[in-house]
Image (cartoon, helix red, strand yellow):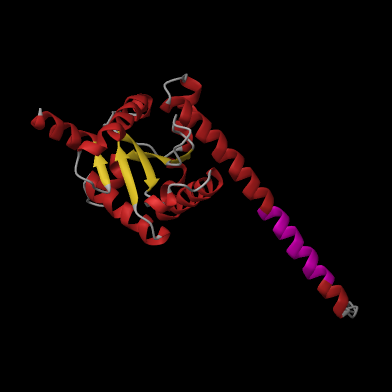
Amino acid sequence: DYILKPVQKNDIITLLRNVSNLERENREKNDTQQKMEDAYLARNVISIIKGKFDQSNVDYVLKHMQLSENVRYVDIEVLVGNEEKEEDDYDNRVLQRQLHSVCRDVLKENVNHFIFDVSYDENSYDVGFIYCENMATRNDMTDREFLESMTEKIEKIMMRSVRMMCGKRVNDITKIAKSYSSCRMLNSIKGFHSQKSVYIYEEEVQVEQKGA
């Protein structure tokens, strides 16, 4: 028979502390690894958005994103009041990171569809979103219903108004640069349209054509 050696209280405390430290180190290592993977994916997506890509970019994105047919580039930004427009770059950057984090929390099943720092405009502090039509259809919703519901959830958490500019629908991710360009165009003419939380390219173009 084995005789169990008495264990001192300090030994138990030391053992538990070591286990806790090891778990923390593993979590930190996993977090760092995930951030590196997210950043590499974002670089590949941005290359496709900007229209400067090759098949290796496409293959990596297809492997690591939950994509379907009929996609859009969507620009998400927080609206600020006149008194906040003088905020410095640091404050705006903090707000942008908060928006990015909240978007990922709202759409947990597609966290890697949100891209930080896509815009050409150095004064823009928005978040890019690769929207797929099946995000709405699997919830029995239209594009507008899904995007408006998502906007409401983001606004509720951030306690600020949010606006989405949705580029034209394209067949697949390799055409997303066209959607991005149409989103930029839509952003430039939004002042001539009624104010709303979600602007969709096809709807706004129809308004333009009717008004012509």
Residue 39 lies, with reference to residue 9, above or below; the image says above
Asked if residue 24 is among those painted magenta in the image, a careful observer would answer yes
Residue 164 lies, with reference to residue 52, above or below; the image says below
The percent position of residue 131, horizontal first and vertical second, equals: 34, 40
The percent position of residue 33, horizontal first and vertical second, equals: 63, 43
Where residue 66 sits, quadrant-wise, is top left
Residue 69 lies, with reference to residue 160, above or below; the image says above
Asked if residue 173 lies left or right of residue 98, the reply is left
The percent position of residue 144, horizontal first and vertical second, equals: 23, 46
The percent position of residue 118, horizontal first and vertical second, equals: 46, 34
Quarter placement of the N terminus: bottom right
Q: Which residues are magenta?
A: 14-27
Name the residue: 24% across, 44% down: 143
Q: Main secondary structure of the magenta part?
A: helix
Name the residue: 89% across, 79% down: 8
Asked if residue 188 lies left or right of residue 128, the reply is left
Name the residue: 37% across, 49% down: 79
Asked if residue 154 is among those painted magenta in the image, a careful observer would answer no
Residue 84 lies, with reference to residue 60, above or below; the image says below
Query: From this viewpoint, is residue 80 visible?
Result: no
Name the residue: 41% across, 60% down: 157
Query: From this viewpoint, is residue 114 visible?
Result: yes
Where residue 208 sits, quadrant-wise, is top left
